[in-house]
Amino acid sequence: MNCKGIGKGEFPQELAKVYLTFAEVYAQAGMKTQAIVYLRKALSVGQRRQQLQQNPQLAALRGDPEFEPIVATRHKM
């Protein structure tokens, strides 16, 4: 059975958006550890690193020693 509006090929992209949204909310709330967790989850399902580097909602994480390696290079999950 196929859910209307979400095909098999679309699910990872939608999940990446959800994870990214959680990361943004946590980053804006100053909860960096939780933001990093959700960024890693977003990357694991296909989020592009370049989009993370340019995301204004993640500005609070820039310069953080855990954030920079995640967006700079391939990171083992």
Image: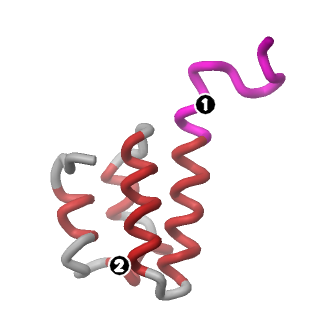
Q: Residue at x 16, y 52 (%)?
A: 73
Q: Which mark is residue 57?
A: none
* Residue 34 versus residue 63 in the image, above or below: above
Q: Residue furthest bottom?
A: 30
Inspect the magenta stretch and tell me whether residue 8 lies in it.
yes
- The quarter of the rendered structure image containing the N terminus is top right
Label 2 packing within 10 angstroms: few (<14), some (14-19), many (20+): many
Mark 2 — residue? 61
- Image coords of residue 24 (percent x, y): 53, 70
* Residue 44 versus residue 72 in the image, above or below: above
Q: Residue at x 55, y 86 (%)?
A: 29
Q: Which mark is residue 11?
A: 1
* Residue 25 versus residue 2 in the image, above or below: below
Label 1 packing within 10 angstroms: few (<14), some (14-19), many (20+): few
Residue 61: image quadrant is bottom left
Inspect the magenta stretch and tell me whether residue 27 lies in it.
no
**Of 24 and 34, which appears nearest the observer?**
34
- How many marks overall? 2
Q: Residue at x 32, y 53 (%)?
A: 50
- Image coords of residue 63 (percent x, y): 23, 81
Magenta part, dominant SS: loop
Tell me which colouring the rendered structure shows: secondary structure
- Image coords of residue 7 (percent x, y): 68, 20
- Image coords of residue 54 (percent x, y): 37, 64
- Left-right relation of 69 to 19: left
Amino acid tagged 1? Phe
Badge 2 or badge 1: first in the primary sequence: 1
Q: Which residues are magenta?
A: 1-14
